[in-house]
Amino acid sequence: MIEQNKKSWNTVAHHFNGKDALPSYGPFAQSEDELGLFGELKNKKVLDIGCGSGHSLAYMAEKGASELWGVDLSEKQIRTAEGTLKDVKHHLFCAPMESEIGLPKQYFDVVYSIYAIGWTSDLSATFGLIHNYLKPGGSFIFSWDHPLYGHLKSQNGELCLDGSYQVEGMIQYQNFKGEEAPVIIPKRKMSTYINELIKAGFTIESVIESEVSSKFDGVDEEVSDRYYSLYKARRFPSTMIIKSVKGIVWQE
Ligand SMILES: C[S@@+](CC[C@H](N)C(=O)[O-])C[C@H]1O[C@@H](n2cnc3c(N)ncnc32)[C@H](O)[C@@H]1O
């Protein structure tokens, strides 16, 4: 699965240059400017999981983060990110987020992931690694498709449930972004994300089922059957955003 997804991400990477990057949390969703989940970033060491074209790391640099680290599966994305971050010191790694690649432990103030975490083949290993990367008291913030969103199909102005939310597993698509680029995307329930965070040792601080960003105020929506549409997003959250913290263990 990882090899196939890597190949396909190399094929479609150009569609995602600067897309789904901070301050945006995802399509139509409230942005970091509206939610303020990260707080002060000055002098913080940050790690981006699935850093793509590096635009979220560039946002972190603008906010004064002291160290910029990123991991992504695709060489093509990493090469683009090298260009995006050419004027700032950075540490980028081409690797699956679910693998132990020797990143420093108990080191980062903030680990985050914008529309990438759901690609992992092993959620429990990934959350376990992220928990290890963080200093005690550090935060982990991620956004991903709201797990029910993909099941909502709009047909003639009505939203209908398509398929079963109950069934989890790997879904194979032959095409991605209109290209012949077969990908396997895991389908998980909201409770799976939450329970795996708890199992990894995180304390959940905030769960957001996104509202539509105020930048779309006054924008007319049209009834649309597209996967992401303002019409759907005004009726159901497109994105879930979860902020967790690594608790401090007090020694007697
Ligand atoms: C929508 S893009 C993320 C955009 C990026 N977070 C940003 O802020 O610009 C999803 C990214 O996840 C990466 N990805 C997919 N599976 C992965 C995996 N198992 N490990 C690491 N990265 C992965 C893809 O290569 C892609 O760059």
Image: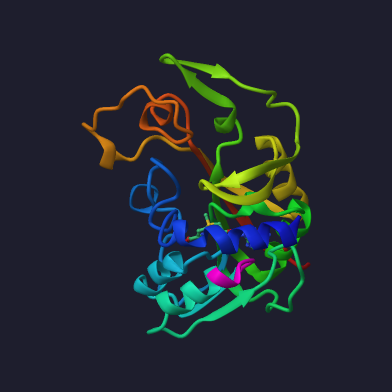
Front-most of residues 152 and 171: 171
Q: Where 140 sits versus 25, above or below?
A: below
Outermost residue on the front side: it is 180
Instruction: Name the residue: 66% across, 50% down.
Output: 182
Name the spot of residue 71 as percent of width and height, x first.
Answer: 61, 70
Front-most of residues 126 and 52: 52
Outermost residue on the left side: it is 218
Front-most of residues 252 and 133: 133
Q: Is residue 20 magenta?
A: no
Q: Where 64 sits versus 182, above or below?
A: below
**Count of marks overlaid on the render:** 0
Front-most of residues 223 and 138: 223
Q: Can the viewer see residue 41 in this picture?
A: no
Name the spot of residue 113 as percent of width and height, x first.
Answer: 55, 58
Instruction: Name the residue: 37% across, 26% down.
Output: 231
For the magenta stretch, what is the residue range? Answer: 72-76
Name the spot of residue 153 as percent of width and height, x first.
Answer: 52, 23
Q: Can the viewer see residue 140 in this picture?
A: yes
Side (left or right) of 87 relative to 100: left
Name the spot of residue 141 as percent of width and height, x first.
Answer: 55, 55
Q: Where 41 sits versus 241, above or below?
A: below
Q: Quarter of the image containing the C terminus?
A: bottom right
Q: Quarter of the image containing the N terminus?
A: bottom right
Side (left or right) of 161 relative to 41: right
Instruction: Name the residue: 75% across, 29% down.
Output: 167
Q: Quadrant of ligand 1?
A: bottom right
> Which colour style is shown?
rainbow
Side (left or right) of 15 relative to 97: left
